[in-house]
Image (cartoon, coloured by chain):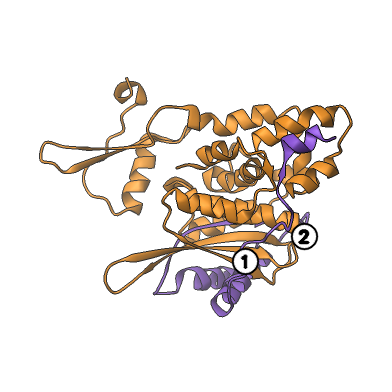
Chain colours: A purple, B orange
Amino acid sequence: MSTLEKDGLEACLFSRPDKKLINIKFMRGTAKIIEAGDLCAAVSTMIDQRDHGTPSGPSRSGKTPTDVRNWVAGL
Amino acid sequence: MSVFSLIQKFDTRRMVPIEVEEVADFIRGLGVKDEIYFWDAEISPATLQAAITHWEYPDDKGNTTTVADIHTSRDLPPYEKRLAEVKEMLHILDPEHYRVNTIENVRSLIEKIVLPQELVDWQNDGIHANSDRAATIHAVAVLFPWETREHLIAPFKAGKITLTDIADLVALPVEYVVVVMSDFWPTYHDAMIAPQKMRYPDKVITLKADHSAIEVYSVPLGDDPYTYARKMHERNNMRGPIASIPHSVWGA
């Protein structure tokens, strides 16, 4: 991780006086090889978008709930 | 409330799919006051599928609002997105020693998280990286309840239904349905809820003779109790002496 990337990460996570980070976790991308700097850049992007965007709400499956016991009985 | 008890709570569900909002409501129902927001991020899922950033916002009156931001890549397919949102949301329940909130620990976690599967070292990668990786399978256990599996296993083994049928039923990626329908899953599942079966307290608060508080915590297996206590002491700006007492003494 380069100094520039480290500084960018520190700026977006720890420079705001109005909020304090209490936890951060990640779900790794699907690429075989991921550079730490690319992941840092993605973190900076997502936080910047959060600060300037509106929340989307949780995703919905769009499916009608199914009782699996009845579903299996009908096989 | 721990993630293990959350898995147990959903274990008896046979109405599927379980929606992300249901899990969020359940966490709120446990008394978690954190505000939870979901964000679509324009990031490549090849680099980062999702993340949680969990913040405290202090106000002028000395109060604090806690906000959990769940970020997921806009380009994730729907089933993957559901899983990623729940995985990140489960970190709201992370105990103190799982939480990553210093620049050194964030850098260290990133260095571990970028590693491909074949370089993952569960023995040495540390509690931050391990808890991050394990949360994915915890999320699978929440979204694919034990009782649902119990109803599906016989017709699946009889060849009456396919993994794709099941994936569409529970709205999860097939690669995770494979794991749940495997013969290994009962062992994994038992291991996941095992901490909930233990009857030891996570935390006990008692009083000294002068009525000042003594806090007693259980220490994660494998951690040195004194080092763990010293870190917690420093992180929480605690005062007073530290003592480590083996469970065999105080738990007897």
Vertical relation: B114 (above or below) B16: below
Amino acid tagged 2? Pro
| Residue A36 placement (x, y as % from top left) | 65, 61
| Residue B215 placement (x, y as % from top left) | 27, 40
Residue highlighted by disc 2? B77
| Residue B175 placement (x, y as % from top left) | 79, 44
Callout 2: chain: B
Packing grade of label 2 (10 A; few <14, some 14-19, many >=20) is few
Residue sitting at x 30%, y 25%? B250
Residue sitting at x 42%, y 27%? B199
Query: Helix or strand or loop: what does disc 2 sit on?
Result: loop
The one of A39 and A61 positioned closer to us in this rendering: A61
| Residue B227 placement (x, y as % from top left) | 38, 40
Amino acid tagged 1? Cys
Cα gap from disc 2 to disc 1, whole angstroms: 23 Å
Q: Give the position of the N terminus of chain B as an image quadrant.
A: top left
* Left or right, residue A15 beside residue B70: left
Query: Helix or strand or loop: what does disc 1 sit on?
Result: helix
* Left or right, residue B149 beside residue B202: right
Residue highlighted by disc 1? A40
* Viewer-nearest of discs 2 and 1: 2
